Amino acid sequence: MALIVQKYGGTSVGSIERIHAVADRVKRWVDQGHQIVVVLSAMSGETDRLLGLAKQIQERPEPRELDVLLSTGEQVTIALLSMALAATGCPARSYTGGQVHILTDSAHNKARIRDIDAARVRADLDAGRVVVIAGFQGIDEQGDITTLGRGGSDTSAVAIAAALKADECQIYTDVDGVYTTDPRVEPKARKLARITFEEMLEMASLGSKVLQIRSVEFAGKYRVPLRVLSSFDEGEGTLITFEEDAVEDAKISGIAFSRDEAKLTVLGVPDQPGVAHQILGPIADANIEVDMIIQNIADQAATTDFTFTVHRNDYARALEILQTTAHALGARQVLGDARIVKISLVGVGMRSHAGIASQMFASLAKEGINIRMISTSEIKISVVVDEKYLELGVRTLHDAFGLDRDGSD
Ligand code: ASP
Ligand code: MG
C-alpha cells in the first residue's frame, strides 16, 4: 500500500465528464489499496475568466482581493470531484488551502509555502477517505487567502507530498510525459521513461513547459519522487529521478529551445578593468536578466567587443540603456538583434562522454547553420542561431544524437 498524491490540471477537470473520469481513475487506485490525496487546479480557462472579471472593474486590483477571487476556481473543482467520488462509492472530503492550513507568506499573487499541517489529512486517510485539496492557494499568518502564482497547483501538490512523506507525487496533465523535445517542432520526439531532476530543471527553464519550475525545485529539495503522466490515456509517464544511473545510457537526454531571445553587442569598448560591470550594471539595475555573455579578446587598439543576450521582452529597454552606456564609454557602435533563438542540448551523460560539443557544431555546420554564440555548463550546451534555423537546428540535433523515435511505434 502506498500513499500517493495525484495532481490533476485544468484540462483534466475541464468538464463534468472529465471530473467523472478523474473520479474513476482515483477509485481504481483506491481499490488497489492505496491512500490517495488529490490536488486540483481550476477548470481550464477559469482562472483567466476570473482575472478578466477583475480587470473589468480595475486595471490593477488589490492583490489581496484578487487572491480571494482567484482561489474560488479551485474551490469549485474540489467540491465537484468529492461529489463524483462519493457517487462512485468512494468516500472523499474536500479542503481549501486554508482548511488544511497550508501556511504561506503574505506575498499575495505569488506567495511561497512555509508549512503544511498534515494532521487533518492523515486522519481522513486513516479513516479510509480520499482527501481532495485545492491547489494554488494557501493562507497567511493573518488568515488571509493567498495564491502561489500561475501554474501554482503543481507546487501545491509537491509540497503536500513532501509534508505527507508520500511515496510518489503524480502530476496528471494533457501530455503523457516529458519528451526529448517539443513534438510540435520535431514529430519524431520520443517520450522519456526517466529524466533526472537536474535535467528536468534545465528542460523546464529552457521552455519545455510541462511543470511549473518551482515545483521541480521543490521536489528536488525535499526529494519527492515526481511523475508526469496523462489523465487522458493509460501509461507510465515520465519519472523524474534522483539516480543518474537509472537514466537511459544516452549522451543527451533532450533538446530544449527558447524563442524569446535577443542579443546586444557593443563594439569598441576600452579593454580595461570595470568595463563589464559598467555595461551590465545599469542593465541589472533595470531588473533585466542577462543570460549569455561573450567578451572578445582585445586587438592592438586595446578595445574589445562585448555581447550578451536578454529576454526578447526586455530587448527595447536594454538597447536604450546600452546606447547611453556606450556613449559614456566612448564605444564605437551598438548593435542589436531580436531575431535569434537558443537551442540547448541537455544531458547528465555529458559528464561521461567527450566530444559532444564538437559533434553538435559539426552537425549544425553540415546544415549551413551559423552559430552566433555558445555557452556551456556541466550538463548543457547552448547555441544562439538565427530564428529561421530553429526547426532545422532542433531536428538536425535530435537526429544526430540518436533521439529520434524509431519508426515502429
Ligand atoms: N488555476 C491556476 C492557474 O491557472 C493554478 C494552476 O492551474 O496550477 O494558473
Ligand atoms: Mg498547469
Image (cartoon, grey):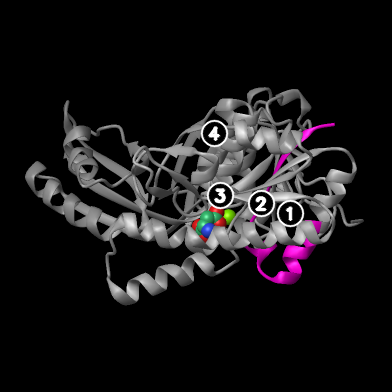
Tell me the residue at 73%/50% (across/down).
Answer: 92
Mark 1: secondary structure: loop
- Residue 73: in magenta span: no
Tell me the residue at 37%/47% (across/down).
Answer: 144
Question: Label 2 belongs to which residue?
Answer: 181
Which of disc 3 and disc 1 is earlier in sequence? 3
Residue 258 in view (yes/no)? yes
Q: What stretch is highlighted in magenta?
A: 1-23
Which of disc 4 and disc 2 is earlier in sequence? 2
Question: Label 4 belongs to which residue?
Answer: 218
User: In front: 179, or 302?
Assistant: 179
Tell me the residue at 36%/47% (across/down).
Answer: 309
Left/right placement of residue 76 relative to residue 139 reads right
Select label 4 or label 1 by which is in front. Answer: 4
> The residue under label 3 is which amino acid type?
Ser
Q: Does the residue labelled 3 lie within 8 Å of ligand 1?
A: yes
> The residue under label 4 is which amino acid type?
Phe
Residue 405 in view (yes/no)? no
Structural crowding at the residue carrying mark 4, measured as other residues with C-alpha within 10 Å and reported as few (<14), some (14–19) or many (≥20): some
Left/right placement of residue 169 relative to residue 67 reads right
Gap in angstroms between the C-alphas marked 4 and 1:
27 Å
- Residue 13: in magenta span: yes
Where residue 308 appears, as percent x and y from the top left, is 33, 44
Question: Label 3 belongs to which residue?
Answer: 153
